Amino acid sequence: SQSAVNDLRTFQQEIEVNGAMYTIKDWKKAAKSYARINKRIYKHYSEYTPQQLQEVGKLNGQCAASFAKATTQSVTSKAQGAIGIIKGIVEGVRESFGLPQERK
């Protein structure tokens, strides 16, 4: 639904503007929110126009860049937490799109 796309847009703006001030706990919460939003988008995937899908792709790319930036900035002082965030993001995206979990 369009509301899920709007939520993704709002989420992307939030992490872009305020992400530099986030703690690891904030980023973990953000990763869960991101997964929930994308799950809603995936649920209605066939209803979106090509333009909406392009916007979803762009927003997801911007979110991924924000997550990556946050993890690289925190790697030196909080490597374990950053690794956990990365794993959580990957897991959340996989779940959102119904992809199988990575084998361990």
Image: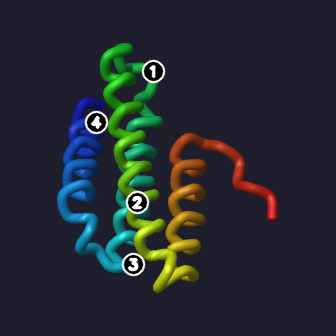
Q: Identify the residue position indicated by label 4 in the image.
A: 5
Measuring 59% from the left and 65% from the top, which residue is drawn there? 87
Q: x, y percentage for residue 7?
A: 24, 45
The single residue placed furthest to the bottom in the displayed view is 77
Q: x, y percentage for residue 97?
A: 55, 41
Q: Earlier in the sequence, mark 2 or mark 1?
A: 1
Measuring 40% from the left and 60% from the top, which residue is drawn there? 69
Question: Quick one: label 2, few (<14), some, or many (20+) residues within 10 Å?
Answer: some
Whole-number angstrom distance, CA of label 2 to CA of label 3: 13 Å
Q: Identify the residue position indicated by label 3 in the image.
A: 24
Residue type marked 3: Ile
Which one is in front in this view, the residue at disc 1 or the one at disc 4? Answer: 4
The single residue placed furthest to the right in the displayed view is 104
Question: Quick one: label 4, few (<14), some, or many (20+) residues within 10 Å?
Answer: many
Whole-number angstrom distance, CA of label 2 to CA of label 1: 31 Å
Q: Earlier in the sequence, mark 4 or mark 2?
A: 4
Q: Earlier in the sequence, mark 1 or mark 4?
A: 4
Measuring 38% from the left and 14% from the top, which residue is drawn there? 50
Q: Is residue 95 above or below residue 46?
A: below
Contact, CB < 8 Å: mark 4 with mark 2?
Answer: no
Q: Identify the residue position indicated by label 1 in the image.
A: 46
Measuring 29% from the left and 39% from the top, which residue is drawn there? 4
Residue type marked 4: Val
In the rendered view of the protein, which quadrant contains the N terminus? top left
Q: Secondary structure at mark 4?
A: helix
Question: Quick one: label 1, few (<14), some, or many (20+) residues within 10 Å?
Answer: few
Q: Is residue 96 above or below residue 32?
A: above
Q: Identify the residue position indicated by label 2 in the image.
A: 69
Q: Earlier in the sequence, mark 3 or mark 1?
A: 3
Whole-number angstrom distance, CA of label 1 to CA of label 4: 14 Å
Q: Secondary structure at mark 1?
A: helix
Whole-number angstrom distance, CA of label 4 to CA of label 2: 23 Å
